[in-house]
Image: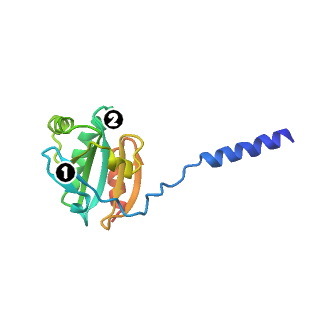
């Protein structure tokens, strides 16, 4: 009897820990206005009708920094295919963003969420965090952590 109770308890623990689909998937992406490193305002809706990889990062995150060469390479490959990458720095100043742009030669949009308001709206709880948004503005997929080129391109193709 005692073993049966333990087994049932373990089943409940496993089911409680099972990964649930993020409730933002399938929802319309929250529109925002953020500034770039030149203090120019940009809105997410400025990129309407494009497939978007929304990438949240900070310069203290080692994997975020390492990922920028890959992201630039992908951006160069997809920018003429109605697709873009938008990187959002979380909680840091314009100088942090500008330094990274210069260091890595980044040409895709790099925006600043100094107040962390937008990252909170997107439920960002770790960095890097990636949101894939369809041409209709719907969140297709959310992927936490570092991603390789093949995985990013695969998800971008899924949105066709």
Dot placed on the residue nearer the N-terminal end, 2 or 1: 2
> Image height check: is 22 above or below 136?
above
Q: Are marks 2 and 1 in contact (CB under 8 Å)?
A: no
Residue 149 location (% of width, % of height): 31, 46
Q: Quarter-wise, where is residue 27 in the image? A: bottom left
What residue is at 32 percent from the left and 53 percent from the top? 153
Pointer 2 residue: 63
Farthest left residue in view: 38
Q: Could you tell whether 18 is left or right of 45 in the image?
A: right
What residue is at 12 percent from the left and 45 percent from the top? 38
Quadrant (top left/top right/bottom left/bottom right) for the N terminus: top right
Q: Secondary structure at mark 1?
A: helix
Other-residue count near label 2 (Cα within 10 Å), few / some / many at <14 / 14–19 / ≥20: some
Q: What is the tally of numbered marks visible in this picture?
A: 2
Quadrant (top left/top right/bottom left/bottom right) for the C terminus: bottom left
35 or 83: nearer the eye?
35
144 or 159: nearer the eye?
144
Residue 82, visible in the rendered structure: no
Q: Secondary structure at mark 2?
A: helix
Residue 78 location (% of width, % of height): 23, 56
Residue 144 location (% of width, % of height): 41, 45
Farthest right residue in view: 1
Residue 135 location (% of width, % of height): 30, 66
Pointer 1 residue: 76
> Between marks 2 and 1, how big is the CA–CA gap?
20 Å
Color scheme of the displayed model: rainbow
Residue 156, visible in the rendered structure: yes
What residue is at 31 percent from the left and 47 percent from the top? 55
Other-residue count near label 1 (Cα within 10 Å), few / some / many at <14 / 14–19 / ≥20: some
């Amino acid at each position: 009897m005692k073993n049966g109770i333990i087994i049932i308890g373990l089943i409940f623990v496993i089911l409680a820990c099972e990964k649930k689909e993020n409730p933002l998937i399938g929802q319309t992406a929250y529109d925002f206005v953020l500034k770039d490193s030149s203090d120019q305002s940009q809105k997410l809706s400025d990129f309407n009708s494009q497939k978007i990889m929304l990438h949240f990062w900070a310069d203290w995150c080692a994997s975020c920094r390492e990922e920028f060469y890959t992201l630039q390479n992908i951006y160069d490959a997809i920018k003429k295919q109605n697709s873009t990458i938008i990187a959002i720095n979380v909680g840091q100043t314009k100088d942090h963003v500008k330094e990274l742009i210069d260091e890595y030669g980044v040409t895709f949009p790099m925006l600043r969420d100094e107040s962390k308001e937008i990252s909170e709206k997107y439920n960002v709880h770790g960095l890097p965090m990636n949101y894939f948004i369809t041409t209709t503005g719907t969140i297709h997929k959310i992927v936490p952590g570092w991603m390789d080129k093949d995985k990013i391109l695969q998800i971008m193709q899924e949105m066709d």
